[in-house]
Amino acid sequence: MDKDGRETPQIPPEVMQIMQQAQGHIQQLEAALQEASQGVEKERIKAASAENVARINATSRQDVEELKG
């Protein structure tokens, strides 16, 4: 019985097993999502770095051309 005096239904073992398997799948999916998110963040950082390097190179070339002229 619960605190209100009502009987609490018993969950059949088969249902408990299914719930435990579902929880395991959820945990695996959460881990996969976290790993994918980390990969996306790494790629975002790599792209931003490449963009900064390209901008620096372009600025350097422009400075060199100005010094030549």
Image: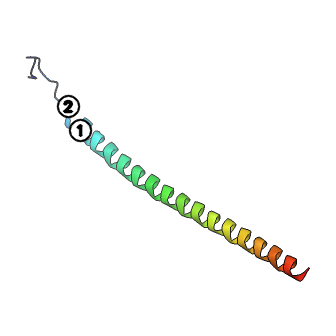
Q: Measuring 34% from the left and 43% from the top, which residue is drawn there?
A: 22
For the residues labelled 2 and 1, say whether their Cβ atoms are less than 8 Å apart: yes
Looking at the image, tell me whether mark 2 or mark 1 is earlier in sequence order.
2
**Residue 46 appears at what percent x and percent y?**
60, 67
**Residue 33 appears at what percent x and percent y?**
46, 52
Amino acid marked by disc 2: Ile
Dot 1 crowding, Cα within 10 Å, few <14, some 14–19, many 20+: few
Residue furthest right as drawn: 69
Q: Quadrant of the C terminus?
A: bottom right
Q: Report the number of discs.
A: 2
For label 1, the residue is 16
The answer to whether 22 appears left or right of 3 in the picture is right
The answer to whether 34 appears left or right of 64 in the picture is left
Residue 1: give its label. Answer: none
Q: Judge whether 56 appears above or below 42 on screen.
A: below
Q: Measuring 76% from the left and 76% from the top, which residue is drawn there?
A: 60
The answer to whether 8 appears left or right of 64 in the picture is left
Q: Secondary structure at mark 1?
A: helix
Decide which of 9, 58 is in the foreground and name it.
58
Amino acid marked by disc 1: Met
For label 2, the residue is 11
Q: Measuring 68% from the left and 72% from the top, which residue is drawn there?
A: 53
Decide which of 44, 62 is in the foreground and name it.
62
Q: Quadrant of residue 45?
A: bottom right
Q: CA distance from mark 2 to mark 1?
A: 7 Å
Q: Quadrant of the N terminus?
A: top left
Q: Quadrant of residue 9?
A: top left
Q: Quadrant of residue 34?
A: bottom left
Dot 2 crowding, Cα within 10 Å, few <14, some 14–19, many 20+: few
Q: Measuring 77% from the left and 71% from the top, which residue is drawn there?
A: 59
